[in-house]
């Protein structure tokens, strides 16, 4: 069944650049109650997605909680660089979890 899902993912297009996925860049993560979780990597734009899909006949239907506007907005986002990831790692390593101080609102009555 996993191979069938991978083959059918060839009919799904990347949410970022619109190119079809290649089955060797699709990995089935698991499934529950008819919903399959798939990791798909696009070689065209180097985007990676986790996709929730249902299998009906010979068609894959994608499931998302994103609206069409959100899909468009996220498709136009700049991909983080390795430096961005390292910067975030450094920040999180030092972050104490106090979001109030992060956004300038100290916790009152603590």
Image (tube, helix red, strand yellow):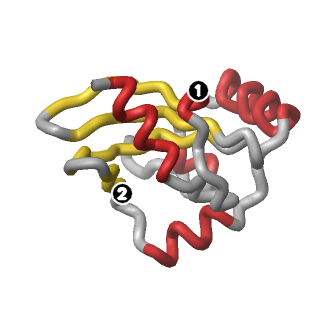
Question: Looking at the image, can residue 96 be seen?
Answer: no
Label 1 packing within 10 angstroms: few (<14), some (14-19), many (20+): few
Q: Relative to residue 52, is residue 76 drawn left or right? A: right
| First in sequence: mark 1 vs mark 2 | 1
Residue most toward the front? 58
Q: Quadrant of residue 18?
A: bottom right
Q: Quadrant of residue 40?
A: top right
Tell which of 84 and 6 is nearer to you: 6
Give how far across and how far down residue 88 sits, in percent: 73, 34
From the image, tell me which residue sits under label 2: 64
Measure the C-alpha gap from mark 1 to mark 2: 23 Å
From the image, tell me which residue sits under label 1: 24
Give how far across and how far down residue 23 sits, in percent: 54, 32
Question: Looking at the image, can residue 8 be seen?
Answer: yes
Look at the picture and state if 17 lies above or below 2. Answer: below
Identify the residue at horizontal 76%, vertical 33% (top origin): 85
Tell which of 23 and 65 is nearer to you: 23
Identify the residue at horizontal 81%, vertical 39% (top origin): 84
Identify the residue at horizontal 76%, vertical 48% (top origin): 45
Give how far across and how far down residue 56 sits, in percent: 21, 50
Q: Relative to residue 32, is residue 73 drawn left or right? A: right
Tell which of 83 and 102 is nearer to you: 83
């Amino acid at each position: 069944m996993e191979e069938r899902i991978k083959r059918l993912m060839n009919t799904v297009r990347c949410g970022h650049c619109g190119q079809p996925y290649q089955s060797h860049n699709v990995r089935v993560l698991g499934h529950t109650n008819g919903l399959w979780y798939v990791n798909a990597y696009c070689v065209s734009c180097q985007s990676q997605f986790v996709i929730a899909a249902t299998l009906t006949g010979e068609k894959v239907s994608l499931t998302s909680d994103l609206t069409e506007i959100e899909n468009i907005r996220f498709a136009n986002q700049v991909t983080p660089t390795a430096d961005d990831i390292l910067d975030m790692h450094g920040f999180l390593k030092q972050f104490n979890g106090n979001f109030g101080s992060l956004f300038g609102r100290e916790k009152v009555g603590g």
